[in-house]
Amino acid sequence: MNTYVYNVVVFKGENSENILSHFKQMPIDSPPFEAILVQDNTLYFDSKQFPPIRDLSEIAEKFDVNYTLECSAWGIKSNYIYVCHQKQALSHIGEEIRQSINNCTSPDELRKADQSLLQEAYMGKLDNHQFFVLKQIVGKKNRELNPTREEDQEVTRSRGRGR
C-alpha cells in the first residue's frame, strides 16, 4: 500500500518566480512530483511515501533559491517542516571562519580553525544555522585532508571490477 505525502513548498530568492514557472510548465504528474499545482507563489504537490527532498534541492540549486517544505502523510495528523537555506549568506565572522577552513592545508591547521569555530559559537557570534553549516565544511575539509583507509579500499575494489 502506497502512502501519499502532501507537500507545500514556498521558495525564497530572486528567482522564485522562475522556479514556480518551471513547475507550472511541468505535466501535472511528473514523478516524483504528482498532482502539481502552483498557486499564490506556492507549490503544492503529492509524492509517494516520502517528500522528494533531493529532487527538490537539485531544482532549487539550479534556480539559486532557498525553500521551505511542509509535508504530511495522508491520514496522519503530524506535519513535518524541512528548510533549505543553501544560499543563505554567512555573517562576517562566519565568512572569515569559512575562508580559514578552506585555506587549511594540514590537519593541524584544520584543528585550529575548528577550535576557532567552537569558540565563536560559544561566545554567541554564530547562530545555529551558521554553526552547523561551518561544521559541515570542517567535516568535508577533514575528509579531504585525511582520506580514510575505507575510501582507499573502495577505490581499489572498484578498480578491480574494471570501473
Image (spheres, rainbow, N blue to C red):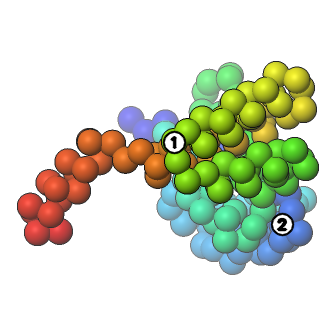
Q: Is residue 68 left or right of residue 155?
A: right
Residue at left 61%, top 27%? 75
Q: Nearer the viewer, residue 139 or 21?
A: 139
- What amino acid is found at the position of numbered circle 2 in the picture? Ser
First-in-chain label (2 vs 1): 2
Question: Residue 76 appears in which quarter of the rendering?
Answer: top right
Tell me the amino acid under the disc marked 1.
Answer: Pro
Residue occupying image coordinates x 77% and y 46%? 97
Position in image of residue 78 (x %, y %): 68, 23
- Quadrant of residue 74 in the image? top right
Residue identifier under label 1: 107
Q: Nearer the viewer, mark 2 or mark 1?
A: 1
Q: Residue at x 74, y 42 (%)?
A: 83
Q: Quadrant of the N terminus?
A: top left
- Residue 132 image point, x, y percent: 70, 36
Q: Residue at x 83, y 31 (%)?
A: 120
